[in-house]
Image (spheres, coloured by chain):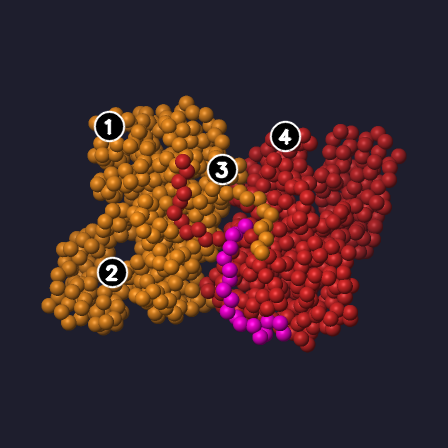
Chain colours: A orange, B red
Amino acid sequence: MLQTGLMMDRPLMLSDVIEHAALQFGDVEVVSRETHGPLFRYTYADCAVRARKLANALAGLGLEPGSAVGSIAWNNHRHLEAYYAVSGSGMVMHTCNPRLHPQQLIYIINHAEDQVVLFDATFAPLVKGIAAHCPKVRAWVCLAEAEHTPAIEGVDNVLAYETVIEPCSDVFEWPSFDERTAAALCYTSGTTGHPKGALYTHRSIVLNALSGCLPGVLALGPDQSLLPVVPMFHINAWCLPYAAPMSGTKLVLPGPKLDGQSLYELMEAEGVTISAGVPTIWQALLAHVDQNGLKFTTMRRTGVGGSAMPQALIARFMEDYNVDVRHGWGMTETTAVATISALPPEASGWTPPECHALLAKQGKSLFGVELKIVDESGATLPRDGRAQGELMVRGHWIVSAYFKGEKSPLVDGWFPTGDIATISADGIMQIRDRTKDVIKTGGEWISSIDLESAAVAHPAVAMAAVIGVKHPKWDERPLLFIVRKPGQSLEKDEILAFLTERVAKWWVPDDVVFLESLPVGGTGKVQKADLRKNYGGVFS
Amino acid sequence: MLQTGLMMDRPLMLSDVIEHAALQFGDVEVVSRETHGPLFRYTYADCAVRARKLANALAGLGLEPGSAVGSIAWNNHRHLEAYYAVSGSGMVMHTCNPRLHPQQLIYIINHAEDQVVLFDATFAPLVKGIAAHCPKVRAWVCLAEAEHTPAIEGVDNVLAYETVIEPCSDVFEWPSFDERTAAALCYTSGTTGHPKGALYTHRSIVLNALSGCLPGVLALGPDQSLLPVVPMFHINAWCLPYAAPMSGTKLVLPGPKLDGQSLYELMEAEGVTISAGVPTIWQALLAHVDQNGLKFTTMRRTGVGGSAMPQALIARFMEDYNVDVRHGWGMTETTAVATISALPPEASGWTPPECHALLAKQGKSLFGVELKIVDESGATLPRDGRAQGELMVRGHWIVSAYFKGEKSPLVDGWFPTGDIATISADGIMQIRDRTKDVIKTGGEWISSIDLESAAVAHPAVAMAAVIGVKHPKWDERPLLFIVRKPGQSLEKDEILAFLTERVAKWWVPDDVVFLESLPVGGTGKVQKADLRKNYGGVFS
């Protein structure tokens, strides 16, 4: 009969994260861009004090453990305080992506039953449009002082954050409860049907955040300064607002100013050593750095995920800017990072392109996450780097069900990701495509991701996307979309010749469409559904 | 009402650690010194295969979940396999300190109800002496091939490890169970009364091991090579045999050869970058390096704990050998590391002695561990770096009770450590003494540790110890014991004059006793009880 061990049985609690930071790293700075412009700075000790005041304020507004609080906000210090006050009180922090369609925002606020919604003044027009349709919201709290809180026509329950917390005590006894209690809620930006909610627990977030601090992931600690560009409304900014105070890392929050110049200046001014974000956000930053002949003087590494990082972009970071790329994979359903790419010790003898090629893969699963790939019958495929199948994942920070979902998405206890991947014998996973994006031609699969990566390696290409188009003989054939870089010329024959040298002959797209821009959705991903709607006819 | 989150509910299991390593870091090496001399090397994938064979073998010997398996063994690969096979099967891995008195060994083996005891051939004489008194042990398994397994007179149930596992299948379905299940058992080497057992859980070990991988602790990862000198019979070698495979770190196990030359040569041959052990083990290593004019070519940092690391030794590591010292604090009851010392970013402007002084403190608590100091009435004392009180600790990897203990050692949910400490406003804890070692004089306290540290800073002093001796006027007064370095002369007046310049006048010991050696116990700590017995009279 199993013996029960004799260790203290204490829950993993998010309130312990901020109180740990206040006690051990009380003078470590948090720097935050106010929505109205200036920089604000304080410490983790200050942050904990204000989180406790907000916890008292939320209780004063009549909220209780289990209540949901929404946010439509940038990465800033008040949003950070809310992360801890809300979850620490046993409530659910529901971060809303402001780039969602207003109808979707209304849907998720009502579905989550948000009783208070925190918002930045930037989004006042959005609030104006949706407030009347969200009858359960008692108060819309602007993350600002009274003087920077706009009146919103037709919305009479707008409060200023500073006015709300000012009279409250900074003494608050954080409750202790089951670590499997819901702490945060994030909806996928599903392109079909209603958004679906991932309901994170205190346990899953603590374990994910702790893993994010590891040397092979972002290597956080008191000697580092972290700027998460990944939004706090996007999977809790990959749990970095938890990992930073847990590890005593200085936190730099860029607020609404995400243009290349603003990010660069903030990084330099605050000695930022680590950043993190989706691949698309780096384009503007690198363009600014290039055009002005600048260098990163303190940045050492950047976490990248959300969609595949093209090898060409990895090469630029590492060779031109001397910034290490930590390329990972995760999704809303995996509470941020699940796999991370890293060079093995023997890479010291490799050429730069060999290193970049390995880092362009999604890498190995972290301890606590297991991967497998399966064929269409659900049978496990070999880990040989060649067999492609749907990626299945399970672990401590993977969803078991969607919030108020009707049926579990799990298959035999594994979450089906919808990604097509390979796994090598040494555990390196590579995403080849989305199940819905893969192009089936003549009984074989073409990876749209690989084709896109090959195309963006051309010096005149700014962006590329590939979709499958019905074909009478081959079932589907690839159609390539190209956005040229400003001032560059590039024609169909030239890009197809370029690709012919780089991919299998039968992968070369049947046609190329040049566009001024590509449709990009709320999380920075190209919306292929839109391309399919407009261009998905039939090749003849 | 609290909402339950929707994440997979999977237990933290030690079997997942070795299987994670086998899948993600299958070709990372484990190098192990055989008890009979030669080096053995294989990979984490091999280790997992053999752990599964051993799990089948233990089941074949009639053991069941909940059974206890003892070990009296060095740091080697078979001991590592046993860690995973035993705990992964839901059994309890009971590591025995071979330096305990045979009567204590008999006591703990019977108290733990070990059904099998694994031992290294070195300890065959020990087994011969205790086996008859351990009637519940079905088999004494020597961690060797048959040819290196000695016959032990009077013990007929001796088996060879390789013979035991050889016929077994390498397929074993690790059971999944509550993460609060006992995984390992380690007894304190209590100087009074019977040893007391700390019964670690899968959860506590996984959380501790994960924290040990963090950049601010040992910074483990696939680019590192770790040699734990701290024995696997001493608090699971501070959980490093779990942290290494979890993080893909190469593991170098020194077996019985712990002399300075053997350790140095192994470190150089295997590219060891990180080591860990109690302060006393470094003396022989540094002596060898000094005497032969050597350097560490790959070692970058070493974890130190178990007893306070003298500042002078920290200085030698950092200045003479360019090895970073990660000085921490923990005890059997805290599943290894609980606090760790680290230089803050502003230390870049400090002098070396300022850095060493900070690193000589025990540092900040890791996330998951909380500290406080209390006075004799149990009232919490201020975190001001001056107030001294008993250190109390609580957290995810702290004992709640002793194995088969009659009453809980906890006070209001906190474990009283028996250490006297200060905590500064920025969270830095410093051990000042053991409650039983503190010297009370004229209503004030003298720290025996501080006095000892001051004394060993004298170039002629090899070891120093201080005890309190009854005094008619002052209650107690300090008595200093000195072991001179070989060939050095040092007299009482000289060392007292040296101390007078370094400590408060009323701290200067009343007398000095020069000895050839100090009594050192099973875990390398000076046994002050012995000194008190022989020298603890009354000052007149």
* Marker disc for residue A155: 1
Residue at 25% of width from left, 41% of height from top?
A: A107
- Measure the C-alpha gap from mark 2 to mark 3: 45 Å
Label 2 or label 1, whichever comes before in sequence order:
1
Q: Secondary structure at mark 1?
A: loop
Residue to which mark 2 is pinned: A437
Horizontal side, residue B351 vs residue B102: left or right: left
The magenta region covers: B163-180
Residue most extreme to the left:
A540
Label 2 or label 3, whichever comes before in sequence order:
3
- Measure the C-alpha gap from mark 1 to mark 4: 51 Å
In reply to whether residue A117 is colored magenta, the answer given is no
Chain letter belonging to callout 3: A
Give the residue type at disc 4.
Answer: Ala
Residue most extreme to the bottom:
B147
* Marker disc for residue B379: 4
Give the residue type at disc 3.
Answer: Ser
Chain letter belonging to callout 1: A
Query: Which percent across, then down, holds residue B182?
Result: 58, 53
Is residue B8 shown above or below A169? below
